[in-house]
Amino acid sequence: MKKKLLFIAPNYYGFNEVVYQGLQSYSDYEVIEIDSTKPYKYKNIGERIFNFFLKTFKGHNLKKIKTELYIQQTIERSEEYDLLLVNRPDMLTEQALETAIAKSKKSKAILWDSIKKIPQSNEYLAKFDNVLSFDPDDCYNYGFTPITNFYFKEAQNWEIKFDVALLITYDNRIHDAIKLFQYFNSQGIKAKARIFVYKKDQIKEKLPENMEIIEQIIPFKKSCEYYFDSKVILDLSHPHQKGLSFRPFEALGLKKKLITTAENVKSLEFYNTTNILYLQDINNIEIPEDFLKDEYLNPDSQITKRYSLENWVENVTS
């Protein structure tokens, strides 16, 4: 009988879908997935009206109750799981988490955000056999097991139309992005950007014309396609995050160069100055002409494979 793996994660930008497909494709487990943020859809107008009164007079939310019920019932469908993987355990109720762990021979929490960025309860994390984190400070401070991010799409023969491409969500990094694009435009560097802005937010900054505002999020499995026609991927790190984002690994898989503000990129075994440019001071930007002109330098194939989704799944499930 095939071993069973229970994978619980929130559906943020479709990231969980990529991991789920990877677990299905590259592991020996039968994978059961639970979307911990799955929205409940009203069956009829009566439920909508009932929820209105429930929230108004009882302080309860039918949609939240139904989502929690879906999670609990899905966990209880199997008597036992060989492995439990949970991203964002703080999204689960204590009852759901305890049920999932009790039914699992081995349990692992996977943190793709630093504790500073998204605080996690020590009580929740202590319940797991192992906690995996991409943030080196958190691994050092809390004894987590270090993991890296991964790439899941590989290089093809694309027509190159741009020198640099940037894809980010609107936050404080916008100021660095504007400075960089002003520099690109002044140096004749052909660049493009898409800035995702939530409808509730209003972007106050004046953007260069080649920075486009979008209000529809690009799903994670599609986002790297935005870089296909560019030589270089631009990576702007979050101020409270020491772990490397997906950009360095996407660049590796797509055989693209990388410009990044993340100092930790120098610790990567595939770091070299031909392919990767670390920007130490955003107020003193200098991009060597040769960096854009020189051909991409292929790392050793074994190093490249080490950061694939396939290898990541093997490490996480071993």
Image (spheres, rainbow, N blue to C red):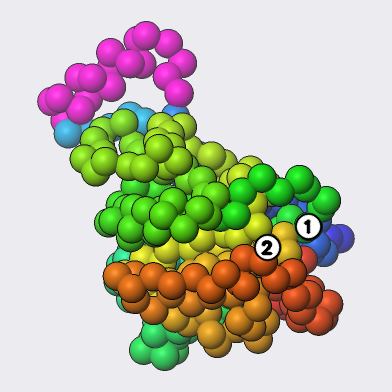
Residues drawn in magenta: 41-58
Determine the residue positioned at 17% across, 34% down. Answer: 59
Determine the residue positioned at 56% across, 63% down. Answer: 247
Q: Residues within 10 Å of mark 2 (few under 14, many from 20)?
A: many
Q: Is residue 271 magenta?
A: no
In the image: residue 12, left or right of residue 182? right
Q: Nearer the viewer, residue 288 or 168?
A: 288
Residue 182 in the image, given as x and y percentages of width and height: 37, 53
Give the position of the N terminus as an image quadrant: bottom right
Q: Nearer the viewer, residue 24 or 13?
A: 13
- Residue 304 seen in the figure: no
Outermost residue, top side:
45
Q: Do the residues labelled 1 and 2 touch (CB within 8 Å)?
A: yes
Give the position of the C terminus as an image quadrant: bottom right
Q: Is the stretch drawn in magenta largely helix, strand or loop?
A: helix
Q: How much space separates mark 1 and mark 2, taking CA atoms?
A: 8 Å
Q: Which of 60 and 135 is in front in this view?
A: 135
Determine the residue positioned at 43% across, 72% down. Answer: 286
Q: Circle 2 — which element?
A: loop
Q: Is residue 144 above or below residue 225?
A: below
